[in-house]
C-alpha cells in the first residue's frame, strides 16, 4: 500500500439509506468533508433532508450553534455518480447485502479513487476477503461495520482480511476514535463479533415463537426482564427488518453450516409476504403505520381477561430452602402480605435465612424504599421451621433447594405427604423437568414451575412452567398470584431452559467458542455486546457472575434435550470448570477476581 494517510479528511459514503445517512452525519459532525453518493436522486435528497432535520434538533437542544450547523451542512454534499469519490481518502459502501452489488461498486471504484485511498465495506455478514480478492488493490480493502443508529451507537467493528495492510487498519481505527466511537478489531468471519452472536439468538427466538412454545409478548418480556435487554428479540427483528435478518442469517449459514444460523422458516414466510417489520407496518407485531414504532393490537394480542377466573385461594405460602433464592422468594411473598413458612433442614438454618431477610429489609428501609414499620410487618409474617411438616396448612408449597433431580423428587414426595389436598406444589428449577417432580407425587395436576430470577426481590420476571399434567386452575392461580406479588409472569412449556436460559446460554456458549478459536479477545467481545447489542453485561462478565459450573450444567441439559451439535458446550468452558475456575465465587473464571 502507498504511504499511510496521516489523517482521513474526506470520506465518500456510497448508499444513503438509514445507515449511510447516519454514518455521513457522524463524519460531518466530526469535521470531515463528506461526499454522499446514491444512484437514487430521491435517496440523496432524503439524506440531505434528514441531516438538516437532525442538526436542527441539535440546535434546539443547544448541542450545536446555528453557525456550527451551517458549517456542518456545508461539509455534506450529495451526488448520484461514483466519480464523485475521486478525491476521497476513504470510501465506505453501505449498499444492500449482495455480493453482486458490492463487487460492482468496488470494481468501479478501482478505476476512480486515488492509489492510496482505503475502500471499506459496511457489510455485517458477507466475506470481506471475497470482496477484497476481487479488487485491484486488496490490501486497501477492509470492513468498517457501524451499528444502527450510527450517531448513537458507540461500537465500530474494524474487519481485516488476510490481505489487508496494517496501515489501512490503523488509519480507520484512528478515524473511529476521532469520531468518538469504540473500535473493536476483528477478523473476517460471518457476522463478525456482535452480529455473529446476536443473530443466532434472534433466530432461535423466532424458532421458539414459530413452534408456539411461547407467545411473542412472553418471549420479548422474558428477555427484557430476565436479562435486562433494552428490547425483546422479536421486537428487535422487526426493528432490524425481518428480510435483513434473513439475508444475514443466510450468509452466515452459507459459511458456517451451523443449524443455529439456518433461518427459521417463519423469517422466509414473513419476508415473502412483505411483512418485514416496522418499515412495512407489520412483522412479528403490527404497527400504527409503516415506519412507526407504536405497536397496535392485532388478532394475536392477548386480551386482558385471558387468565381470569377459576383460581384457587392462596393466603399462606411455604418456601423450602435456606439459600439466597429461598430467602429472596420468602421476602417477596411476605412483602406482598402473605403469611410465609420458611422451612429448612434444621431450625437453625431457617432462622439464619430469616435473619438474612431481616438484613435485606433493613437495607430497603435505609434506602427509603419502605418504612421501618412496613419492614417489621413483613418480617413478622415469616415463620422459620426445621421440618416440612410445618407446610401442613399452606396453600402453596414452593421449593428452592439444590438443582439436583433426586433431591427435588424426595422433597416433592415429602410435600405430597404433608400438604393438604388442593395445595399447589411448585418448583423454582431452572433446568430440570417439572413433570419428573410431578410424577414423584400422587397429585401431578397440582404441580407447576415458578422460575424466579436472582435476586428474587429485584428481578421482575417469573417463568410459569406448565406440564402436560398441570390443572388449568393451578396455572390460572399461579399466573394471578405472580401479579399479586408484583412480578411479571410469562407462560412456557416444560422443556429444558424454558424461555430465558434456552435463548441466553447458547449465546454465551458461542461467545466462549469465539475466544477458544482466538477470533476475538474477552474484552473486545464484552465491549461489542454492550456497545453494539445493548447488553447490560458482556458475555464473559455474565458467565463469571453466574458461575462457570452452573453455566456448563445448563448447557449440558440443553444439548442433551435438543441434540443439536451447535449446543455442545465449548471445550474451553469444560476445561475451566475442571480446573476449578468457576468465576467470581472462586476468584477466577474467565478473568481474575478479588476473593471476598
Image (cartoon, grey):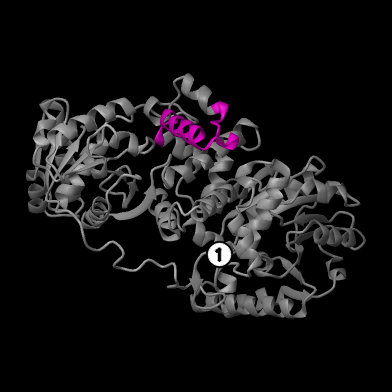
- Residue at the top extreme? 579
From this view, report whether residue 561 is shown above or below residue 317: above
Say which residue label 1 marks. Answer: 239
Read off the magenta span.
546-572
Out of 125 and 76, give the one closest to the viewer: 125
Quadrant of residue 116 in the image? Answer: bottom right
From this view, report whether residue 148 is shown above or below residue 493: below
Q: As drawn, is 486 to the left or to the right of 222?
A: left
Query: What x and y, as percent, mark residue 524?
Result: 58, 42
Residue that appears at 8% across and 47% down: 376
Q: Is residue 559 magenta?
A: yes
Residue that appears at 48% across and 19% down: 579
Query: What x and y, as percent, mark residue 199?
Result: 59, 51
Residue that appears at 85% across and 69% down: 82
Query: What x and y, as percent, mark residue 240?
Result: 59, 62
Q: As drawn, is 217 to the left or to the right of 49?
A: left
Q: The residue tagged with tag 1: helix, strand or loop?
A: helix
Quadrant of residue 64 in the image? Answer: bottom right
Out of 460 and 15, give the one closest to the viewer: 460
Q: As drawn, is 474 to the left or to the right of 129?
A: left
Residue that appears at 71% across and 80% down: 45
Out of 509 and 438, give the one closest to the viewer: 438
Q: Dot 1, how many residues are within 10 Å of its Cα: few (below 14), some (14-19), or many (20+)? A: many
Q: Is residue 227 magenta?
A: no
Query: What x and y, as percent, mark residue 437?
Result: 30, 34
Amino acid at each position: 500500500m502507498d504511504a499511510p494517510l496521516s489523517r482521513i479528511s474526506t470520506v465518500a459514503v456510497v448508499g444513503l439509506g438509514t445507515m449511510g445517512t447516519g454514518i455521513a452525519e457522524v463524519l460531518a459532525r466530526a469535521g470531515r468533508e463528506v461526499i454522499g453518493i446514491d444512484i437514487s436522486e430521491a435517496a440523496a435528497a432524503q439524506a440531505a433532508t434528514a441531516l438538516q432535520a437532525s442538526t436542527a434538533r441539535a440546535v434546539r437542544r443547544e448541542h450545536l450553534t446555528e453557525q456550527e450547523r451551517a458549517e456542518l451542512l456545508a461539509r455534506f454534499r450529495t451526488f448520484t455518480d461514483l466519480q464523485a469519490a475521486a478525491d476521497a481518502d476513504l470510501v465506505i459502501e453501505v449498499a444492500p447485502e449482495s455480493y453482486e452489488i458490492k463487487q460492482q461498486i468496488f470494481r468501479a471504484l478501482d478505476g476512480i479513487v486515488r492509489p492510496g485511498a482505503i475502500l471499506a465495506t459496511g457489510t455485517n455478514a458477507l466475506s470481506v476477503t471475497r470482496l477484497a480478492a476481487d479488487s485491484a488493490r486488496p490490501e486497501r480493502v477492509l470492513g468498517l461495520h457501524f451499528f444502527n443508529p450510527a450517531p448513537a451507537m458507540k461500537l465500530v467493528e474494524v474487519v481485516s482480511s488476510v490481505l489487508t495492510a496494517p496501515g489501512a487498519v490503523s488509519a480507520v481505527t484512528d478515524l473511529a476514535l476521532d469520531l468518538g466511537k469504540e473500535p473493536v478489531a476483528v477478523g473476517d468471519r460471518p457476522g463478525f463479533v456482535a452480529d455473529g452472536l446476536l443473530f443466532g439468538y434472534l433466530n432461535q427466538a423466532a424458532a421458539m415463537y414459530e413452534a408456539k412454545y411461547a407467545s411473542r409478548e412472553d418471549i420479548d418480556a422474558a428477555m427484557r426482564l430476565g436479562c435486562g435487554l433494552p428490547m425483546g428479540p422479536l421486537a428487535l427483528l422487526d426493528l432490524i427488518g425481518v428480510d435483513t435478518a434473513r439475508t444475514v442469517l443466510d450468509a452466515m449459514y452459507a459459511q458456517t453450516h451451523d443449524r443455529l444460523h439456518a433461518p427459521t422458516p417463519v423469517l422466509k414466510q414473513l419476508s415473502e409476504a412483505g411483512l418485514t417489520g416496522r418499515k412495512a407496518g407489520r412483522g412479528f407485531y403490527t404497527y400504527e403505520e409503516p415506519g412507526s414504532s407504536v405497536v397496535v393490537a392485532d388478532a394475536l394480542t392477548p386480551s386482558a381477561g385471558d387468565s381470569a377466573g377459576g383460581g384457587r385461594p392462596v393466603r399462606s405460602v411455604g418456601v423450602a430452602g435456606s439459600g439466597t433464592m429461598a430467602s429472596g422468594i420468602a421476602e417477596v411473598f411476605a412483602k406482598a402480605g402473605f403469611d410465609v413458612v420458611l422451612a429448612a433442614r434444621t431450625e437453625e438454618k431457617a432462622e439464619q435465612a430469616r435473619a438474612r431477610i431481616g438484613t435485606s429489609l433493613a437495607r430497603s428501609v435505609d434506602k427509603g424504599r419502605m418504612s421501618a414499620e412496613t419492614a417489621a410487618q413483613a418480617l413478622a409474617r415469616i415463620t422459620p421451621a426445621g421440618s416440612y411438616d410445618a407446610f401442613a396448612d399452606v396453600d402453596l408449597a414452593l421449593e428452592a433447594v439444590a438443582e439436583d433431580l433426586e433431591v427435588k423428587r424426595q422433597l416433592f414426595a415429602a410435600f405430597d405427604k404433608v400438604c393438604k389436598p388442593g395445595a399447589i406444589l411448585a418448583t423454582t428449577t431452572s433446568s430440570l423437568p417439572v413433570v419428573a417432580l410431578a410424577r414423584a407425587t400422587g397429585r401431578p395436576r397440582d404441580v407447576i414451575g415458578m422460575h424466579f430470577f436472582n435476586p428474587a426481590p429485584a428481578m421482575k420476571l417469573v417463568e410459569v412452567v406448565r406440564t402436560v399434567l398441570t390443572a388449568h386452575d393451578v396455572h390460572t392461580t399461579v399466573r394471578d398470584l405472580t401479579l399479586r406479588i408484583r412480578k411479571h409472569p410469562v407462560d412456557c412449556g416444560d422443556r429444558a431452559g424454558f424461555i430465558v436460559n434456552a435463548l441466553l446460554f447458547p449465546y454465551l456458549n458461542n461467545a466462549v467458542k469465539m475466544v477458544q478459536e482466538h477470533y476475538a479477545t474477552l474484552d473486545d467481545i464484552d465491549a461489542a455486546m454492550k456497545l453494539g447489542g445493548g447488553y447490560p453485561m458482556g458475555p464473559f462478565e455474565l458467565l463469571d457472575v453466574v458461575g462457570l459450573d452452573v453455566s456448563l450444567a445448563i448447557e449440558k441439559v440443553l444439548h442433551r434435550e435438543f441434540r443439536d451439535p451447535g449446543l455442545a458446550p465449548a471445550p474451553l468452558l469444560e476445561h475451566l470448570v475442571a480446573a476449578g475456575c468457576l468465576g467470581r465465587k472462586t476468584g477466577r473464571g474467565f478473568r481474575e477476581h478479588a476473593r471476598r
